[in-house]
């Protein structure tokens, strides 16, 4: 069985959802917010279900809530609209996990690999090497997928071991990840200002006072802590940009 999960929280996904409902041989599971449900035109007979959620529910919350509506088989999570041919390519993949291809030049690819290393050290997982707007899990992954309490998170960060991962070219650009951009950027700026304040304070102190060993050690520790804090905040911001925030719960199903 081919399962397709489609969260619909904006009008951009309406046409894609309506067309996918007509697909034969696939179980289509749609989660749509109340204000948009009237625009979903389901065929008289189709394999799947349509669940209504409160307005304001995020895509990731909808994905977490639809885990129990799947049949045994492959699982395709569509956070963006793709073509019929692209859907077929995802399902035809022999890899355990398939994501969207992401184009990077050599320099960007080098930076990506560097961040992969730091993220693995800091957080214990890696980014998927590709765009997670669409993710497909092979049928052998279903026993795990069906028992996950946070399917959204498992499809956005690579904590998987001993699995094969491949990519499929898609025409649509990556979707924006769901997180508080203001809060994320503000956290990085706060650490930048804190580091600058510590450095300025250190310079002023040593201009007017005679340095002692303990004083030098305290200022050195303060600078080191500020640098580490800034580095971690940048890593978290990068994580947010690529995957969105971590802590999504299940959305509230209205009907």
Image (cartoon, rainbow, N blue to C red):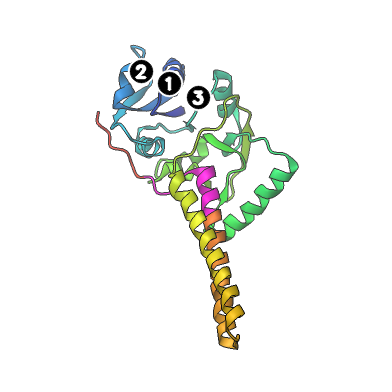
Q: How many marks?
A: 3
Residue drawn where x is 44% and y is 17% of the image: 15
State yes or no: residue 159 in magenta: no
Residue drawn where x is 38% and y is 21% of the image: 47
How far is mark 1 from mark 3, CA to CA? 8 Å
Compared to residue 109, the image places residue 21 above or below, namely above
State yes or no: residue 240 in magenta: yes
Compared to residue 121, the image places residue 207 above or below, namely below
Compared to residue 63, the image places residue 219 above or below, namely below
Instruction: Describe the element under mark 1 as helix, strand or loop.
Output: helix
Classed neighbour count for the residue bearing mark 3: other residues with Cα under 10 Å, few (<14), some (14–19), many (≥20): many
Q: Position of residue 127 (x, y in %)?
A: 57, 47
Classed neighbour count for the residue bearing mark 1: other residues with Cα under 10 Å, few (<14), some (14–19), many (≥20): many
Provide the residue designation for mark 3: 81
* Residue 144 placement, left or right of 104: left
Q: Of the numbered discs in the image, which one, if any, rests on residue 17? A: 1
Q: Residue furthest top?
A: 44
Compared to residue 148, the image places residue 172 above or below, namely above
Q: Do the residues bearing badges 2 and 1 touch, measured as CB atoms within 8 Å? A: yes
* Residue 204 placement, left or right of 248: right
| Sequence-first disc among 2 and 1 | 1
Q: Is residue 245 visible?
A: no
For the record, the magenta segment spans: 235-248
Instruction: Describe the element under mark 3 as helix, strand or loop.
Output: loop
**Closest to the observer: 182 or 199?**
199
Provide the residue designation for mark 2: 40
How far is mark 3 from mark 2, CA to CA? 15 Å
């Amino acid at each position: 069985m081919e399962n397709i999960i489609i969260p619909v929280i904006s009008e951009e996904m309406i046409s894609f959802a309506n067309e996918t409902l007509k697909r034969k041989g696939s179980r289509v599971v749609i989660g749509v917010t109340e204000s948009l449900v009237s625009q979903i035109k389901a065929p008289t007979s189709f394999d799947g279900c349509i669940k209504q959620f409160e307005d304001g529910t995020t895509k990731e919350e909808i994905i977490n809530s639809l885990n129990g509506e799947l049949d045994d088989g492959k699982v395709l999570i569509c956070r963006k609209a793709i073509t019929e041919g692209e859907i077929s390519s995802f399902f035809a993949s022999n890899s355990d996990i398939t994501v969207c291809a992401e184009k990077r030049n050599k320099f960007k690819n080098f930076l990506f690999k560097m961040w992969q290393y730091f993220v693995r050290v800091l957080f214990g997982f890696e980014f998927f090497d590709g765009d997670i707007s669409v993710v497909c899990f092979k049928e052998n992954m279903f026993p795990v997928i069906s028992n996950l309490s946070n399917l959204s998170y498992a499809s956005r960060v690579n904590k998987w071991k001993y699995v094969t991962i491949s990519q499929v070219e898609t025409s649509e650009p990556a979707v924006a990840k769901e997180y508080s951009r203001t809060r994320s950027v503000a956290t990085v700026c706060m650490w930048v200002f804190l580091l600058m304040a510590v450095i300025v304070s250190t310079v002023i102190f040593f201009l007017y006072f005679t340095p002692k060993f303990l004083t030098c050690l305290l200022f050195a520790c303060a600078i080191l802590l500020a640098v580490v804090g800034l580095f971690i905040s940048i890593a978290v911001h990068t994580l947010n940009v690529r995957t969105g925030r971590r802590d999504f719960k299940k959305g509230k199903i209205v009907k």
